[in-house]
Amino acid sequence: MNGLKHIVKTVKGESPILFVIVLILFSGAILCVPAMLWDDRELMGINVWIKPLKFFISTAVYTLTVGYLVTLYPFSNLKKHIIRNLVAWTLLFELVIITIQAARGVQSHFNTSSALNGSLFSAMGILIAINVLIMVWLAIETLRVKLKTPRAIQWAIFLAWIISIFSSWVGGQMIAQMAHNVGVTDGGVGLPLLNWSTVAGDLRVAHFFGLHSLQILPLFALVIHRKLKTNTKNEIAMVLIFSFSFAAFVFYTYYQASRALPFIS
């Protein structure tokens, strides 16, 4: 809990604009709950507001994470400001599009049924592409510079960026086939809330776990550093073992989905 308070305080102090956008995203998630109770329309077999709810939460967590991680890099204030604003504003605009499409009762992703829907989907692609390029650049910088953090945590951050880039590639595979399911059409039987298919492959599983490696790996490294009180070499070894194990799990979920097998039957 103290760690979360530190992250929030740091982000709020260094990037008030990004912090406000994070609050807007979390507020959007909260507002989706009464919207689901008030609006019983369904799309692809689930309430139209479930997708915005998931994206608001996931995007808020990601934006807050990036907002904090950028403070660890030895960049100029201007460079940090540019990075944080690009990430925060592009993802906010993406959520605006997803929310608009939900309110209209139509798909936001893979929807080219009209000029408007196709344009909005293309805009979302551009906004995400900007974030993927930032991921790649930050991964390179993580390998090149010394972060203001212990070496084991820096390794965790670097490997988390690599896994996140892979998960973004998985997202590209979904765009290529204009669907997230493999073996059945989108919108079938799925897990509660997450809606991951329980009868066929679903590429969203690898995409989800891969993107959230950015929280899981550094958190593991932080716990190792604070609790075990061992030397740097051992810390790095444990971080590498955990990170490669997690990467193998993410790749397996992708391989499983690509073979039209459900994550959970």
Image: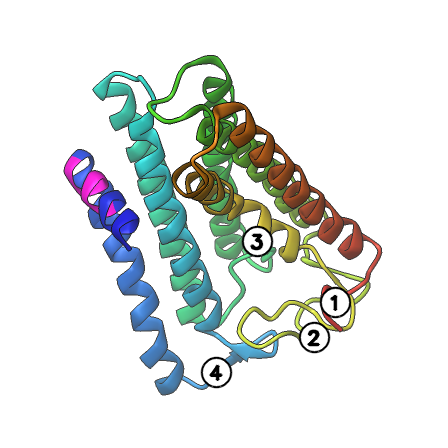
Disc 2 and disc 1: Cα gap in Å? 7 Å
Residue drawn at point x = 45 percent, y = 35 percent: 131
| Callouts 1 and 4 close, C-beta under 8 Å | no
**What is the number of the mark on residue 208?**
3
Query: Given the image, on which type of amino acid does mark 4 rest?
Result: Arg
Q: Earlier in the sequence, mark 1 or mark 4?
A: 4
Picture quarter with the N terminus: bottom left
Q: Earlier in the sequence, mark 4 or mark 3?
A: 4
Q: Label 1, on which residue?
A: 185
Residue drawn at point x = 34 percent, y = 33 percent: 86
Disc 1 and disc 3: Cα gap in Å? 20 Å
Disc 3 and disc 2: Cα gap in Å? 19 Å
Disc 4 and disc 3: Cα gap in Å? 25 Å
| Front tag of 4 and 3 | 3
Density class for disc 1 (Cα within 10 Å; few <14, some 14-19, many ≥20) is few
Q: Label 4, on which residue?
A: 41
Q: Nearer the viewer, residue 103 or 148?
A: 148
Query: Given the image, on which type of amino acid does mark 2 rest?
Result: Gly
Assign a secondary structure to mark 2: loop
Vertical placement of residue 117 versus 157, above or below: below
